[in-house]
Image: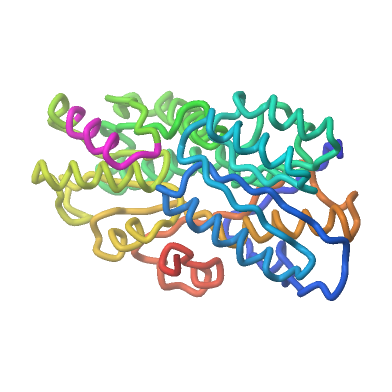
Amino acid sequence: MHRRKVIGGGVGLALTTVLPGLARAASGKPVRIGYNVSTLANPFFQGMTKGVVDAAKQFPAMTLLNTNANGDANTQASMAVDLINQGIDALILNPINANAIVPVVQQADKKKIPVFTLDRGAACGDCQTNFLETDNVAMGREGARYIAEQLKKRYGKIQGNVVDLVGLIGTTAGDDRDKGFMDEFKAIAAGNPDLKLVARQEGQFDQEKSFNLMSQIMAANPQIDAVFNGNDDNAVGALRAVRQASRNVPIGDPKHIIIIGIDGTRQALTAIRKGDMDATLSQNPLTMASQSVKYVDMFYNGDRSAIPAHQFWPHILITKENIDSPDVKSYGLWGETV
């Protein structure tokens, strides 16, 4: 159960090179999977849950116990322990907090129940059989570079006032995206002194929270050029605030506020098609979740040694210019199907 192998997923990598077809198993050890998702209030996690449910149906010997923590770390811990006590064979977790979930994962480990963490990990390293996520640090870095590129197109050099609406602090996704963004932003700003970070607030992956924060930030800063968002819910909340303040102007207009998010949700894709939002760094929760279920099957009916301890799933930058391109269609506009 303890391996050091890490597999990376390149940007725009065709998913078929990483995810073989989920063949319907004719036989195999019956496996009871306990699944707990952090919340279903977020479209990304709705997609993830659909991916888990649909993939489990491809294996006749699998039984899925599907639970939802509703955004509460204590509820998640209680539900996960209950699943362990029901005698499950494997646990797929989408942790709310990387540290809070550690005792639960360790409890499963002691009972020889493999734990597969999905999108967000537990802060205990090899206690997880597999941690499958997108490279969140890389996405944060790419977000900073995208903003810098757009500002250079606007001004002829990299300058402007930028806002960072952080995700949910305490999650691996929220922390790593912010680390990637801030590290890259500081590196770019070191050579471009007119590039300024005017606000950095925790949007918590929440539209309403991000709307309120962005409204306050705009009231205090008459000039804002760009906003990096920890996810698309942050971005949609920020866009709503921009609209309410009557500061929503077309892409290309010097007064346009550049908005980039992460996930590829339906709302974000719609805003990108309309030209209101500039970009999203899309993940694909359907295929990512399917792979996690496939690893459970591999653990009991295949080659355990082939399961990586940590894997980065591919992601792709989506803009109005490439949203209907073959590369994006091949990757999958999951937000338009969930």
User: Could you tell me which residue is drawn at 52 percent across and 45 percent down?
Assistant: 68
Against 279, is 26 above or below? Answer: below
Left or right: where 92 falls relative to 242: right
User: Could you tell me which residue is drawn at 44 percent across and 42 percent down?
Assistant: 143
Against 248, is 199 above or below? Answer: above
User: Could you tell me which residue is drawn at 65 percent across and 38 percent down?
Assistant: 80
Q: Position of residue 24 (x, y in %)?
A: 76, 74
Left or right: where 53 falls relative to 147: right
* Residue 208 within the magenta-colored segment of the rendering: yes
Left or right: where 109 falls relative to 154: right
Of residues 161 and 200, which is closer to you in this image? 200
Of residues 303 and 12, which is closer to you in this image? 303
* Residue 128 within the magenta-colored segment of the rendering: no
Q: Quadrant of residue 64?
A: bottom right
User: Could you tell me which residue is drawn at 74 percent across and 41 percent down?
Assistant: 115
Q: Position of residue 23 (x, y in %)?
A: 76, 74
Query: Quarter holding the C terminus?
Result: bottom left
For this orientation, the residue located farthest to the left is: 246
| Dominant secondary structure of the residues highlighted in magenta in the image | helix
Q: Position of residue 251 (x, y in %)?
A: 23, 55
Here the colouring is rainbow
Of residues 103 and 154, which is closer to you in this image? 103
Q: Position of residue 336 (x, y in %)?
A: 41, 67
The boundaries of the magenta stretch are 205-217
